[in-house]
Image: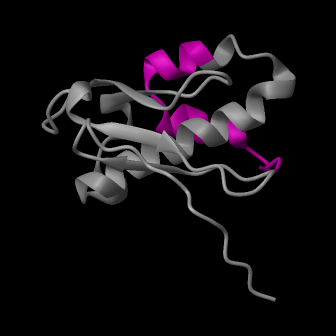
Amino acid sequence: LRVLDDLEGLARTGFSRRELAELAEVPEPERTEAIFNCWTRKEAFIKACGEGLSHPLDEFDVAFVAGEPAAILDIRSGEGSAGDWSLTDLKLLPGYVGAAAVEDPRTHFEVAGIISYR
């Protein structure tokens, strides 16, 4: 998590209307983490679809506000319904956010440990 020059611009180009409306309600001190949560959750989904950034980012919504569990809320394209997917946060280290997605709602992720290289 770090402040970048144009995080709000990233949100405008990569978030859906619903996500932008929710982001507008997030208090300023929590906004950076909310943007990174949304981005990493969206990225996990498009990678799991196998399309990467060629997948339109405004065609699906993810939950991202602090305190909300990671979830795909709506899919408006050809990847099935939100209920077909499992999305989870990967909280590995303080100050970092990550997410993983898989097309199987029964899948749950667990982080077993951290490997450190020096």
Most extreme residue toward the bottom is 118
The residue lying at 24 percent from left, 26 percent from top is 83
Q: Position of residue 3 (x, y in %)?
A: 83, 47
Most extreme residue toward the front is 112
The residue lying at 33 percent from left, 50 percent from top is 46
- Start and end of the magenta stretch? 1-22
- Residue 37 belongs to the span the image colors magenta: no
Residue 9 visible (yes or no) = no
Picture quadrant where residue 84 is located: top left
Picture quadrant where residue 54 is located: bottom left
Is 42 displayed left or right of 34 in the figure? left
Q: Is residue 97 above or below residue 12?
A: below
Snapshot colouring: one colour
- Residue 11 belongs to the span the image colors magenta: yes
Of 38 and 115, nearer the camera is 115
The residue lying at 75 percent from left, 28 percent from top is 31
Of 92 and 113, nearer the camera is 113
Is 40 displayed left or right of 5 in the figure? left
Q: Quadrant of the C terminus?
A: bottom right
Our reading of the magenta stretch's main secondary structure is helix
The residue lying at 14 percent from left, 33 percent from top is 80
Q: Position of residue 111 (x, y in %)?
A: 55, 57
Most extreme residue toward the right is 29
Q: Position of residue 64 (x, y in %)?
A: 57, 28
Residue 7 visible (yes or no) = yes
**Count of labels in the image:** 0
Q: Position of residue 101 (x, y in %)?
A: 37, 47
